[in-house]
Image (cartoon, rainbow, N blue to C red):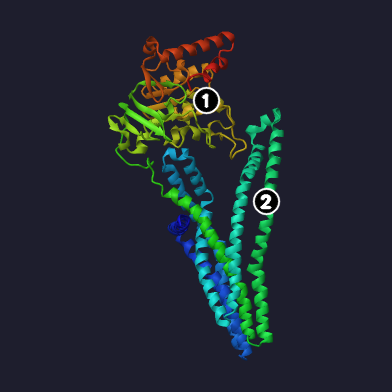
């Protein structure tokens, strides 16, 4: 009983989802809904008209001796109407539908992109939510149209099936029994075939994923070196052969049953009704003389139409429930209630930061407590360093500061007021960030630096160049074919620039330089740089951001010892705080870490007296700070 209830619930939800799809498409493009409805109606009407009425009228007219003129007038009227319907169909295919599809694409993806821009960051870190999001986005416009079209086909297909039964019943009551055969073929055997296909595809999925992975890896440039320098190609070839064998084994497992079910489907859906009804009609017409030629023509014609109407109806019904799952993803995503909506309104935070205070803040991520009863304060115009082991909570702290998440407990106060009370976009406009896990976009260097900021056109080039100089990337960018107008990555441009990790990192740092705001955050800004470039970068940051509140996250303590205040985090809370000098005098955890790091640095420096750069930095990159 419980299973039946769940099945009914799923079916009712599928129906509700299709009504949601109809309503959504109607709001975006009502013209498409209207024309799909008319087109579907005319298609079924045409089948029924020709099979049930047209043939019968012509043959009855000939049998009754009606004048040729009368018959031709009827044929001409029908042909004229058919011509108008054909013109309408051509207009749909050639003009109306393409225009409507463009409108739907624009309107639907505008909704989806607006929603994806508005949901909180944690949604993209939730694998289940992200999977539903990607499924909702994939060919959403086409699938939405298909869903609505299937809904109309189910409605008009059901009406057409009832009418077909009625017409056949009026002509001959026994002939209706033959219609049960394609019903069995479609609803029994075709359904079993669908279940079998699902099971087969499910069993094949692991093998197909392996095949797709190997096919993808074989042409990705980042795997090319290992392919040529190691024996991994032989391993992948072995895995590929095993996957192909797996697909073949699964196919063999289902082949016999699939063949039997397909034979039964064809026999019941086509053979039995076509040949059976034809033999029955021929017997009634030629032997028992109990059926007229007109009735035979109607029955045989209706036999073909009814069969295809039933096939179309069952296929549309199946598609309707399949599409219901897609609409479920789409509906769930669009109806999701954001916990931290990007367009959240509130008070204007102004443009000055006097203080930002973390007050007894705790935060749990996926049931794991990451920040525990943490309290700290950033004063306007001061420089702060956040240091600690991997997993200490440094980056999470910055995400809380930027309101990517909200604290589970406690408050974050800006100028004495809870940051949740401010207009979110205006609040985030107070910050410039250079994250360690940066991303480059397939745009020009200048666009990657400005990142859509409202910079006057006449100041754009000067500001970009200055930011690149401060980040240490200016000379490299100027050596590119088009300077700051060079496209980065080769996603869309074969001549796009592919920079090193350190060069990309400098461009990310330039983003923070170019943005005018009171608070700037640098998350491991020198992790990919050698010590000389690192020292120059920090000098530029301190010099150019003297009026800003600065926060550094760095695993190299030598780069943050000039900060006004240092917070050492461990286990999600502040373990030590103070100036570099006071923390060293305290001889606690910070002093121990700094001393160990300094010893590693000196040891490597003595081993590489001439190389000072990257070798000296190497021990710290795998050390205790990250």
Q: Position of residue 124 (x, y in %)?
A: 47, 39
Residue on which the image places disc 2: 253
The structure residue drawn at horizontal position 67% and vertical position 29%, both measured from the top left corner, is: 226
Residue on which the image places disc 1: 474
Given residues 183 and 78, the one toward you in this image is: 183
Compared to 247, does 97 lie above or below?
below
Question: Can you name the residue that lies furthest to the left here?
Answer: 416
Element marked by disc 1:
helix
Residue 237 located left or right of residue 625: right
- Residue 217 appears in the figure: yes
- Determine the CA span between mark 1 and mark 2: 63 Å
Q: Position of residue 296 (x, y in %)?
A: 63, 82
Compared to 469, does 198 lie above or below?
below
Question: Can you name the residue that lies furthest to the front here?
Answer: 1
Residue 269 located left or right of residue 317: right
The structure residue drawn at horizontal position 46% and vertical position 49%, both measured from the top left corner, is: 110
Element marked by disc 2:
helix
State the image quarter where residue 565 is shown: top left
Q: Position of residue 385 (x, y in %)?
A: 40, 21
Compared to 220, does 596 lie above or below?
above
Badge nearest the viewer, 1 or 2: 2
What's the mark number on residue 168? none
- Residue 565 appears in the figure: no
Compared to 264, does 530 lie above or below?
above
The structure residue drawn at horizontal position 51% and vertical position 33%, both measured from the top left corner, is: 439
Q: Position of residue 338 (x, y in %)?
A: 39, 43
Dot 1, how many residues are within 10 Å of its Cα: few (below 14), some (14-19), or many (20+)? many
State the image quarter where residue 368 is shown: top left
């Amino acid at each position: 009983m419980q299973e039946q209830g769940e099945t009914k619930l799923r079916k009712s939800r599928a129906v509700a989802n299709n009504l949601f799809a109809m309503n959504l498409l109607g709001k975006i493009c009502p013209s498409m809904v209207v024309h799909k409805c008319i087109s579907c109606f005319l298609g079924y009407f045409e089948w029924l008209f020709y099979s049930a009425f047209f043939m019968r009228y012509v043959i009855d007219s000939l049998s009754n001796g009606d004048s040729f003129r009368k018959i031709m007038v009827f044929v001409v009227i029908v042909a004229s109407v058919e011509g108008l319907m054909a013109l309408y169909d051509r207009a749909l295919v050639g003009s109306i539908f393409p225009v409507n599809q463009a409108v739907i694409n624009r309107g639907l993806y505008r909704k989806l992109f607006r929603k994806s821009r508005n949901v909180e960051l944690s949604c993209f870190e939730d694998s289940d939510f992200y999977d539903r999001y990607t499924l909702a986005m994939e060919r959403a416009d086409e699938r939405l149209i298909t869903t609505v079209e299937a809904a109309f086909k189910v409605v008009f297909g059901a009406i057409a099936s009832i009418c077909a039964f009625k017409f056949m019943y009026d002509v001959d009551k026994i002939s209706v029994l033959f219609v049960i055969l394609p019903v069995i073929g479609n609803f029994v055997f075709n359904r079993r075939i669908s279940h079998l296909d699902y099971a087969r595809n499910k069993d094949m999925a692991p093998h197909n994923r392996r095949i797709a992975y190997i096919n993808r890896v074989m042409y990705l440039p980042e795997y090319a070196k290992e392919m040529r320098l190691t024996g991994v190609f032989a391993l992948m070839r072995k895995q590929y052969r095993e996957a192909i064998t797996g697909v073949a084994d699964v196919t063999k497992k289902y082949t016999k049953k699939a063949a039997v079910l397909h034979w039964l489907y064809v026999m019941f859906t086509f053979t039995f009704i076509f040949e059976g009804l034809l033999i029955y009609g021929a017997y009634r017409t030629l032997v028992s003389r109990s059926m007229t030629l007109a009735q035979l023509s109607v029955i045989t014609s209706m036999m073909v139409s009814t069969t295809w109407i039933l096939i179309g109806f069952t296929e549309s019904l199946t598609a309707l429930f399949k599409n219901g799952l897609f609409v479920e993803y789409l509906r769930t995503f669009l109806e999701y209630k954001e916990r931290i909506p990007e367009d959240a309104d509130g008070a204007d935070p102004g443009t000055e930061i006097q203080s930002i205070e973390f007050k007894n803040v705790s935060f749990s991520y996926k049931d794991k407590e990451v920040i525990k009863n943490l309290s700290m304060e950033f004063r306007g115009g001061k420089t702060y360093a956040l240091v600690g082991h991997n997993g200490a909570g440094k980056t999470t702290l910055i995400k809380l500061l930027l309101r990517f998440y909200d604290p589970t407990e406690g408050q974050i106060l800006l100028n004495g007021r809870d940051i949740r009370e401010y207009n979110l976009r205006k609040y985030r406009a107070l910050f410039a960030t250079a994250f360690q896990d940066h991303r480059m976009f397939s745009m020009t260097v200048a666009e990657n630096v400005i990142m859509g900021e409202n910079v006057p056109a006449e100041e754009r080039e000067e500001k970009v160049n200055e930011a690149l100089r401060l980040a240490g990337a200016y000379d490299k960018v100027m050596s590119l074919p088009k300077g700051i107008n060079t496209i980065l990555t080769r996603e869309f441009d074969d001549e796009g620039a592919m920079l090193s990790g350190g060069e990309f990192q400098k461009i990310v740092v330039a983003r923070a330089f170019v943005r005018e705001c009171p608070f700037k955050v640098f998350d491991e800004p020198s992790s990919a740089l050698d010590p000389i470039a690192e020292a120059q970068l920090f000098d530029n940051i301190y010099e150019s951001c003297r009026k800003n509140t600065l926060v550094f996250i760095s695993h190299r303590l030598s780069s943050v010892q000039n900060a006004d205040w240092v917070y050492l985090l461990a286990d999600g809370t502040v373990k030590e705080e103070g100036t570099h000098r006071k923390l060293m005098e305290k001889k606690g955890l910070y002093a121990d870490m700094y001393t160990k790091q300094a010893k590693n640095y000196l040891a490597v420096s003595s081993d590489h007296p001439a190389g000072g750069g990257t070798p000296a930095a190497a021990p710290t990159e795998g050390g205790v700070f990250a």
